[in-house]
Image: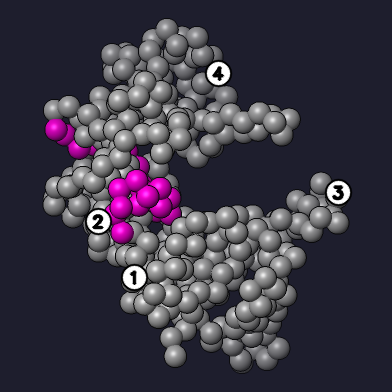
Amino acid sequence: MIKPILVITDKCDVHADFVTIELRKIGGDIVRMNTQDMGFNSDFTLGKLDLAEPWQLQFHFKDSDKTVTSDSFDTIWYRKPEPVEPDQSITEEHAQVFVKEEYSYFLRSFYNLYSHKTWVNPFWNLKHASQKLPNLELAVKLGLKVPKTLITNNPEVAREFGEHCHWNLLVKTFHFSGFVVNQTEAWHCFAKRIDKEQFIQFAETINFAPTFLQQYIDKSIELRVTIIGEEVFTAAIHSQEIEKTKSDWRAIDSYQIKHTVYDLPVDIAQKLLAFNRHYSLVFSTFDLILTPEGEYYFLECNPNGQWYWIEELTQIPMAKTMAKLLMSI
């Protein structure tokens, strides 16, 4: 009997939904751990009563009425878990913070305790592969072009970098994606092209936090590369056809941007596969630029990035490929 795949994600994850459909077509199945609601949707025990014996694990998920023990799964797909939501009866903010923190560290221990299982991808490998600056360093070592980059909290050093780049600059964040004001107004932090006048206007704020600057690279198209196992899928994102998306294609709904299947050169694909091998990843997504002169630039790797919208827009069979990978590893 084939053991089900343990999928760690959240209850609104369409990627897991469609991969589950493909898994069932080929004789597989899943047990889904939606971390968001596990505080009130699961009963669990993880104990060691005899120090000489292995840990005894039991998770029972109320919505699916499925029970998981350490012997009932061999493969774990770490998708997009969300922080655990405290029970609604917990109203004090400090108590909510306590519950979230305790669950966060409990889950990390759980992930590490079962690191001997087969993961897509291993939790700590994801953490290592999510660091922007080491990734740029690795890309260079692999022979990929990267934009000139500076991170500083010194306005004068930033100004000198601007001069060096002839004020053709891009500013972006390390990680912060946005914030909500009064639970009604959302602000998103996209990469933004800036000139000298804009730099001078905000220069004094540079010393408040690390400022991530890069030389702006002119684009013909942007490329989203998704690697599943040894399969390399590439979509061209025609971001330069829309004014709002020229600096960052995420600035509007992706479905409004033209996407096409793209034939990535073999040597670039091989370098990205080598990137995965460096971090022991079997899945990842990459953002690249193709310049008007035909040069490829590496921007970043998201080792647990989203991809299903690309399948919907291009018909690239990624859900089916992911299902096959989960069944074969």
* Tag 4 secondary structure: helix
Residue carrying label 3? 92
Specify whether residue 303 is painted magenta.
Answer: yes
Tell us which disc is closer to us: 3 or 4.
3
Q: In which quadrant of the rendered image does the N terminus lie? A: bottom left
Mark in front: 3 vs 2: 2
The Cα atoms of the two marked residues, 1 and 2, are separated by 13 Å
In the rendered view, tell whether residue 145 sits above or below residue 6.
Answer: above
Residue beneath disc 1: 325
Residue pointed to by mark 4: 205
Q: Position of residue 262 (x, y in %)?
A: 21, 45
Span highlighted in magenta in the image: 294-317
Using the numbered discs, state the Cα–Cα distance from disc 3 to disc 2 in whole angstroms.
48 Å
Choose between 3 and 303: the one closer to the eye. Answer: 3
Q: Residues within 10 Å of mark 1 (few under 14, many from 20)?
A: some
Which of the two labelled residues, at mark 4 and mark 2, occupies the earlier sequence position?
4
Find numbered disc 2 in the image and state the secondary structure of the residue it sits on. strand
Q: Image check: 261 left or right of 16? A: left
Whether the magenta-drawn stretch holds residue 281 is answered as no
Residue 242, image quadrant: top left
Q: Residues within 10 Å of mark 3 (few under 14, many from 20)?
A: few
The kind of residue on which mark 3 rests is: Glu
Q: CA distance from mark 4 to mark 1?
A: 47 Å
Look at discs 3 and 1 and give the one toward the viewer: 1
Q: Residue 158, relative to residue 50: is it above or below?
A: above
Q: How many marks?
A: 4
Query: Which of the 4 image quarters holds residue 243?
Result: top left
